[in-house]
Amino acid sequence: MRKLLLAIDQGTSGAKITIFDTDGRVIAENKKCYDTFYPAEGHVEQDCEQWWRVIAQGIKEIFREHRVQPKEIKGIGIDGTSWAMIPMDQEGHVLYKTLIWLDRRATEEAMWMKEVIPEETLIEVSGNPVDAGYITPKILWFKNHQPDLYRETFKFLQSNGFLVYRLTGEYSQDLSQGYGFHFFDMKSGTYNLEIIEALGLDPDKFVQPSACHTVVGQVTPEAALLTGLEVGTPVVAGGLDAACCTLGAGVIDVGQTQEQGGQAGGMSIVLDKPRNHPRLILGYHVVPDLWLLQGGTTGGGGTINWFHREFGNVSESFATMSQMAEEIQPGSDGVIFLPYMKGERSPLWNANAKGVYYGIAFDKSKGHFIRSTMEGVAYSLRHNLDVAKEVGVQVEHLYSVGGSANSKVWTQMKADITGCRIDVPYADYATGLGAAILAGVGVGLYSDFNEAVKKTVKIQTSYQPNDEVRPLYNKGYALYRQLSDCFMENFWT
């Protein structure tokens, strides 16, 4: 009988359910979408129960449509998006809509936090700046605006923790998602009770963190009925999608760096000790005793998706758009794009930031807009890497994953603009593979993470930076930074 691993990748716009064998090969997959709601300015919500319904349906469809038996699944790993606030009562009912990472309603609470506790202290403990997108301000908003529901809340869960609960009936919190809480001690992996008390929160409402590969429960009869899974199948705690993606890219050694080209953009640098920068993001890796210094941006592969939706046509594929970009000279003949499509996270932390095209003229074509969009995302990546240098972290080699890694021209741009060699593993499945590896290590199918990566991660393509275009891109990057600085004080809500 085969030994297979089921991965659930809960993303911003939808979920991927993938079954891997122990060599990292994809045996079967299913994709599901769900809704995002924008009920007011700065409010961005989803229905986590819809996540569960479509994921359960997707798992059942895999068993029905593919030659996979439930008893072949030896472990389940789940990754999820960051900074999702899910209040649950003691009977397992969701008490409020899910505030996802894009939600910015807690701006006043974030400001209040810095009045109660100096931001320097919060950064020293948690390793992260105070921003409305994080979970702590969202919980404070919930307490202020829904006090009765706050009192009724038994536990606050995050995205993968909620899905673990629906599968197992067990409340869980993994280490890699702890960075969303400003009372999470980044050095010890525990909660700082003094900060919780100072913020007026109840420490009993938070689940103690577990290692990401820890088996935290088994599939219940109720979940088995909904999904087709076998009762008793082990489920691990799972982790942050970006951290699982880093593992799925084979990035587990100190100094290695994953570049994320999914809906959002960013990078994750592996550290052997917590080293924070006030304009970057620090969290635990899903691999024990390692940390990730991260840059998370709102503009990634989603910028091209947006451009295609608004200005493309049905005959233009991603490959066609990449070809149009390739026909334009590096530097896009002076067109610069600021990819701040939903405010911007690191390293700017400006909720009012907006996307900007600069340098438009009558001689500019659609290809200029496409290429400059790609270059703008690459410039934002370089900006985060440059900020990491300020704390002594130097990156020369990237492992690129996500949908944009399928574009040769875009990936070459990133190599040219950052000056880094880029290796591309099996880009489309890296996040799910990371979640599957967590399950495989947790149930003992791999002896450790090194064995798992050696067996499952294969480099498909490599890119070297082109020294001939570096001067041109250095000039473009300098203008990008100048425009960013100029607009940053002039953006309005």
Image (tube, rainbow, N blue to C red):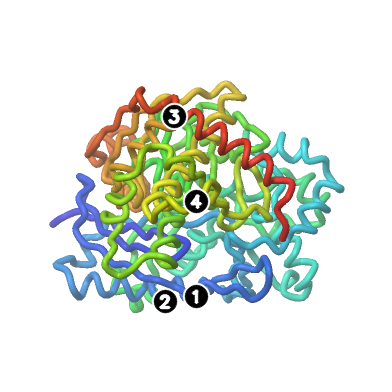
Would you say the residues marked 1 and 4 are in contact, meaning their CB atoms lie under 8 Å apart?
no
The quadrant holding residue 26 is: bottom left
Q: CA distance from mark 3 to mark 4?
A: 20 Å
Q: CA distance from mark 1 to mark 2?
A: 6 Å
Crowd around label 2: few <14 · some 14–19 · many ≥20 (10 Å): some
Would you say the residues marked 2 and 4 are in contact, meaning their CB atoms lie under 8 Å apart?
no
**Screen quadrant of the C terminus:** bottom right
Left or right relative to 57: residue 125: right
Nearest the viewer among 36 and 477 is 477
Would you say the residues marked 1 and 3 are in contact, meaning their CB atoms lie under 8 Å apart?
no
Mark 1 or mark 4, whichever is nearer to me? 4
Left or right relative to 182: residue 437: left
Give the residue drawn at x 22%, y 39%: 460
Crowd around label 1: few <14 · some 14–19 · many ≥20 (10 Å): some
* Mark sitting earlier along the chain (1/4): 1
Mark 1: amino acid:
Glu
Residue furthest out toward the right:
115
Is 389 rendered above or below residue 240?
Answer: above
**Residue tagged by mark 3?**
472
Give the residue drawn at x 21%, y 62%: 28
Give the residue drawn at x 78%, y 40%: 119
Q: Residue 62, how many percent across, how many down?
A: 24, 70
